Image (cartoon, coloured by chain):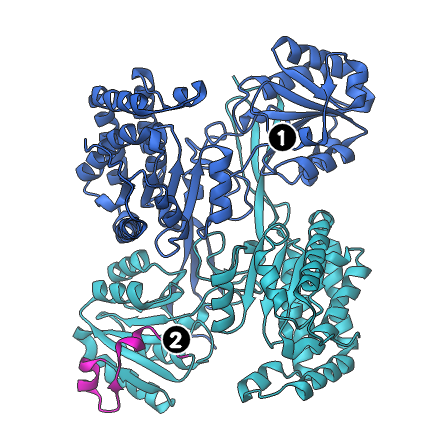
Chain colours: A cyan, B blue
Amino acid sequence: MTPAPVRKEPESDIRVLMRDMGMRARAAAGPLARATPEQKSKALAVASMRVIADAPAILRANALDLAEAKDLSDAMFDRLKLDQKRVDGIAKGLREVAALPDPIGEIMAEWPRPNGMRIARVRVPLGVVGVIYESRPNVTADAAALCLKAGNPVILRGGSDSMHSSQALYACLRAGLEAAGLPEGAIQLVPTRDRAAVGEMLTMVEFIDVVVPRGGRSLVDRVQRESRVPVFAHLEGICHTYVHSAADLDMARKVTLNAKMRRTGICGATETLLVDHAVAKTHLVPILDDLAKAGCELRGDAATQALDKRVVAATEQDWRTEYLDAIISVRVVDGVDQAIEHINTYGSHHTDCIVTADAKAAEQFIGEVDSAIVLHNASTQFADGGEFGFGAEIGISTGRLHARGPVGVEQLTTYKYVVRGTGQTRP
Amino acid sequence: MTPAPVRKEPESDIRVLMRDMGMRARAAAGPLARATPEQKSKALAVASMRVIADAPAILRANALDLAEAKDLSDAMFDRLKLDQKRVDGIAKGLREVAALPDPIGEIMAEWPRPNGMRIARVRVPLGVVGVIYESRPNVTADAAALCLKAGNPVILRGGSDSMHSSQALYACLRAGLEAAGLPEGAIQLVPTRDRAAVGEMLTMVEFIDVVVPRGGRSLVDRVQRESRVPVFAHLEGICHTYVHSAADLDMARKVTLNAKMRRTGICGATETLLVDHAVAKTHLVPILDDLAKAGCELRGDAATQALDKRVVAATEQDWRTEYLDAIISVRVVDGVDQAIEHINTYGSHHTDCIVTADAKAAEQFIGEVDSAIVLHNASTQFADGGEFGFGAEIGISTGRLHARGPVGVEQLTTYKYVVRGTGQTRP
């Protein structure tokens, strides 16, 4: 394992370094697109075995990161820290991606033309992916595995805090590439902590086809604002659970409690509860009871406060806030139209749920809520590629182009048209 | 018909104007997404009838454009000019888009989860489309029709030269919207010639989801360089026809002549001919004969010049040039590997063809040429949404994200995930 260079290099050197990585990624695209499913699976299986075999070295590298890290909050320390169980999880993740169906070469559609030509839309790799992440070292392996499965060269730019851990994991991935006869340029880790490297990645449109930021709001915000390269991301998940007047009370309680409190820190956690006026008296108080007992702070509009003394006043800002914490904002609405309007106005087009036994209200909600994921009678916490059956995800996108919702292997591909003829010419 | 304002307005006014249009487009997105297939078809059918009824007014408006136009080349004059036949063609185009299947609401995929939830990927409109075009007035109707069919509000920014014609056609489209009860914001035409309007469109990321430039290289280049909004476009179509050693001579002659000379000014026209060394003597000279007889200028490498005295020397720049004219560059290659390398190096990832009777060579070419459209034994001039069976196209994209190749109604849509449960919570 090479120790991470920590010196600040001049910007022109960073530019040269990054463009060189970009060129090597581009050069790897062809060989990787032609790699067999077996080669890609082998690379991931070997990498997985290496992670297990190298666990002591990986943990030592992680200890170095933890020792060097300054001013880490408890949450940041937890994100950065690896233990044997987490290392095993990383190895397992690699094996799981290896076992996914290979998407490349799939015939997505095929049709004949009147002149006898046959046209097929065939799935091919998307191109070079740049992944910019923060302190979780596992992203090094997870993101690289998904990109490799989809046939995409990847340039990984990990957090400065996790540099040693990422390099130790990267060594395992390289061993996998080598064992499978795949080019080194298929997976590259930016070898410097200099933040200028991120700026280069965001402007290298000739070398990078899409950037995926993995991390907190400030990272995603910077990437979305500055990037000239297309971005798959969501800035925030302001998710709603809407309890309609025809909601079953037990279901509404169970779904809302899970949607808010199962894990409060994930992007699919509900941040705002909307309840129909017609059932505010019967449904809202029991739901608030459940949330309060689970330790959730309650902020609500006047109608909610009138029903429950524990509720503090919500401000306009609350409707626009992703708490990622045990806090919920609550509003009483006068029906499905107002609920939809609230969600489309204040939400982040991520994931929203209606609880109702009324099929018509459900269909209206599903049709009119303009979000990547819309649920009927199921928890917003299901907003996850794994839960969707994608095997794994590199993130969730609230963008409308190309990838919307969970970004799995399939969303990391594109297509080409293949036209097979017998000498046809255009009249 | 309102006369076009021609005064130069201060930039701040343009900004206010454009943002106001953006807001109206955004506000129309919901109603348009919920419009029935019948409403959208009716709007287009009524617009088509209005185009026929208004033909005299449209032709008068066009005459005004032609009279005002200064320094137009013959080609530009031809693009700008309307006659009764072209007006009829515009009306027919509207009817054809009206008759296309409605893409919205299509269930693209659906699958159950082990916990009983059902997940569906459902086709929905892409969002607000900005179309920036030059002198062809028909784009006003064609682009608006495709966007409307896909449920997308559109902001049209036509060329200054065709302002009167575009406004006359726009009046017909508005009549269609009104007759169908669809919002005015669904189709808007920028009412100023001020070029600052384009700059605003390219940065209005809050209001425009994708920009489609329709026009010459300098327009597309500007849009691709400046736009903060994603772009569906191709900068150029440097298309290749490759005559492999196993090509049937008659087929190679027929396909190459059509690919180059059927229409030299379209993006799918072949610009470079590659011929295998093994068949240069037998195949190349007859192919060059055909081209020369059809009036094509021949530029070639030394090997080509050695075979045919009519061939002038091609420079490195020729391999990178989209002539859009009766000129072809010709290179003798030593086999499929070199042909693929040439195309991936010098091409524009648009459309490329191999002529061969060898299935293995064809599959290698199809797999390794990194272009939106790859053909085997068919003319590159088939690179067209209509020829693909899409009904109509708004352009061809060489981008890898979302829309690659012909951009038809389907490519102007995206999807949302709809999850239907019975009270499921995430463990």
Q: How many marks?
A: 2
* Same chain, labels 2 and 1: no
Q: Position of residue B330 (x, y in %)?
A: 71, 23
Locate residue B2, reporting x and y percent.
Answer: 19, 33
Q: Which residues are magenta?
A: A301-323
A377 drawn magenta: no
Question: Identity of the amino acid at label 1?
Answer: Thr
* Residue at horizontal 38 percent and vertical 89 percent from the top: A294
In the image, taking residue B205 as reference, residue A229 lies left or right, namely: right
Measured as percent of width and height from the top left, residue A15 is found at 67, 60
Task: Report, in whole angstroms, how far the alpha carbon at label 2 lies from the one at label 1.
Answer: 51 Å
From the viewer's perspective, tell me whether residue A75 is left or right of residue A288: right
Residue A133, quarter of picture:
bottom right
Q: Is residue B114 visible?
A: no
SS assignment at label 2: loop
| Chain of the residue on which disc 1 is drawn | B
Q: Amino acid at mark 2?
A: Glu
Q: Is residue A315 magenta?
A: yes
Q: Tag 1, which secondary structure?
A: loop
> Which mark is on residue B321?
1
Numbered circle sitting on residue A322: 2
Q: Nearer the viewer, residue A59 or A408?
A: A59
